[in-house]
Amino acid sequence: DFEFYKKRHAPLIKDIMGPSLHKIEVRRGVSDPQNPNPQYIAVISIWVKDWEHYQKAIAARQQELIDEVPLFTKQMPQVQIDEVAFEL
């Protein structure tokens, strides 16, 4: 449910992260002739500016995020932590 994600879940992430958040970017999967059914309806990228604060904030309210998952999807979201290797 992309609208739920947009109106409730992404703002919850923003609230939880507080000052550790740099920005959130949410992308919507779109279809094209070669891929009529995108693999993901939504992909969120979260830029963190204070890693230690982020870890504390998420640890304190992690269950709240997990409890929301069934409200917008039937699958557990995949999480990947990465770093910017380079920019052009």
Image (cartoon, rainbow, N blue to C red):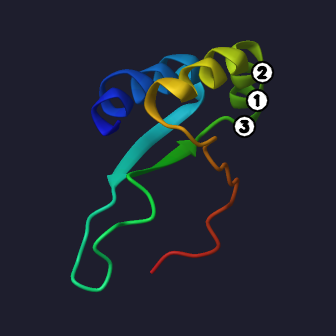
User: Which numbered tag is attached to residue 3?
Assistant: none
The residue beneath circle 1 is: 55
Residue 5: x %, y % from top left: 38, 32
Q: Quadrant of residue 58?
A: top right
Residue at image coords 21%, 83% = 33
Q: CA distance from mark 1 to mark 3?
A: 6 Å
C-alpha gap between disc 1 and disc 2: 6 Å
Mark 1–mark 3 CB contact (< 8 Å): yes
Residue 57, how many percent across, how many down?
Answer: 69, 20
Question: At label 2, which amino acid type do we have?
Answer: Ala
The amino acid beneath tag 1 is Gln
Q: Is residue 15 left or right of residue 62?
A: left
Q: Secondary structure at mark 1?
A: helix
Q: Quadrant of the N terminus?
A: top left
Are the two marked residues, 1 and 2, in contact with CB atoms closer than 8 angstroms?
yes
The residue carrying pointer 1 sits among few (fewer than 14), some (14 to 19) or many (20 or more) residues within 10 Å by Cα, namely few
Neighbourhood count class around disc 2 (C-alpha, 10 Å): few under 14, some 14–19, many 20 upward: few
Q: Nearer the viewer, residue 7 or 70?
A: 70
Task: Tell me the CA gap for discs 3 and 2.
Answer: 12 Å
Which of 25/74 is in front? Answer: 74
Q: Residue at x 63, y 14 (%)?
A: 64
Q: Is residue 51 left or right of residue 67?
A: right
Mark 3 secondary-structure assignment: helix
Q: Which mark is residue 51?
A: 3
Number of the front mark, 1 or 2: 2
Can you identify the residue that label 2 sits on? 59
Whether the residues at callouts 3 and 2 have beta carbons within 8 Å, the answer is no
Q: Which element is circle 2 on?
A: helix
- Residue type marked 3: Trp
- Tell us which disc is closer to us: 1 or 3: 1
Residue 24 position (above or below residue 28): above
For marks 3 and 2 on the same chain, the one whose residue lies earlier in the sequence: 3
